[in-house]
Image (cartoon, grey):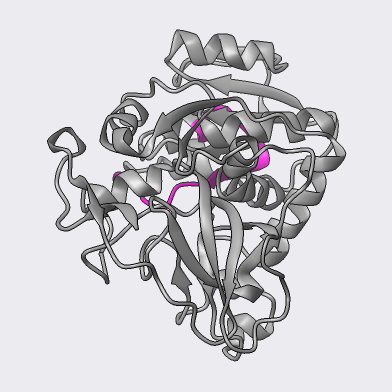
Amino acid sequence: MLAALLRSPKPIDENPLVLTDIPKPLPQDHEVRIRVRACGMCHTDLHIAEGELPLPKLPLVPGHQIVGIVEALGRGAKRFQEGDRVGVAWLRRSCGRCRNCSKGKENLCEGAEFTGLQADGGYGEFSTVDEAFAYPLPSDFSDHQAAPLLCAGVIGYRALRLSEIHGGERLGLFGFGASAHIVIQIARHWNCEVYVFTRSPDHQQHARKLGAAWVGRAGDSPPEKLQAAIIFAPAGALVLDALRALERGGTVILAGITMTPIPEIDYARLLYHERKIRSVANATRHDAEELLALAAAIPLRTEIELFSLAGINQALQKLKRSEIRGAGVIEVSSAAR
């Protein structure tokens, strides 16, 4: 099968992903093999390609927002049938036995495995996954439109829930890429006022189109204080900007998998009065199931830019430069709808 293979991490401008023919994976017990139609792009893929995350497996096929068709069943797999359309997200497996798993926090399982990190992901023609970690997808979403829901959507939804924002309150979004353009739609559906901080004029225009009450740059003072803020950009200095804009008792959510160092915080001026900073680590299957149901009910509309598998390095270069409006999606199979 054809796949974009990472043999060793390096700056994305050096084109570290190489289109290579590799063996088709065999589904193990209780796994399904998926013929990949589309795979959404994520900043995590960029961090992996550039070696900003520890890599337990090399060579590696990244990609973890997979949409495809079940093509083969491993022994004991019964949840899906061949021909079913499914999605695969970041969380690939959890132990199911540890303290965190038993409390519904499988996203914090120390034995968790992740798609496109411990196992080959969706930047290839085929991928495998435990059937318990695959999802039926809303029929109203095309393959391309569904792909960003599986990480940008799921992580954004978890971040939104952890922010404890309520209808009628003000939410700040720092950065306006794939995840934020989904989150703003959910927040508006919940009757929240959304304030967007982004330096890109195109992203500012996109935010206004999706109903932002105010748009500015990080460091600007919004007209009203915020009850919650979500930071999507991996820049630690934004934590101070978010805290400055926050109301007493408010929460700042850090939605990225990695971040540059957070500068020293003036406790009395920025953190006191029960302001909180909270990170988001991965997501649970329950998060994914809730988000997919909500996506169909609202309905969410993902704005996408399509790229070919052969152009994966150039696509990730655009992602790094914040030149993608909405979400980038790799079209893996010509059968993608």
The percent position of residue 218, horizontal first and vertical second, equals 45, 21
Q: Is residue 58 visible?
A: yes
Q: Is 93 situated above or below 302?
A: below
Front-most of residues 157 and 326: 326
Left or right: 230 with respect to 114? right
Question: Where residue 201 sits in the image (x, y, percent)?
Answer: 46, 8
Can residue 274 be seen at all in this image of the molecule?
Answer: no
Which quadrant of the view contains residue 215? top right
Q: Is residue 198 left or right of residue 87?
A: left
Residue at 59% in and 88% down: 75
In the rendered structure, which segment of residues is drawn in magenta?
242-261
Residue at (48%, 43%) from the top-left corner? 333
- From the viewer's side, name the closer residue of 156 and 166: 156
Q: For residue 232: magenta? A: no
Depth check: give the residue in front, 46 or 127: 127
Residue 249 colored magenta?
A: yes
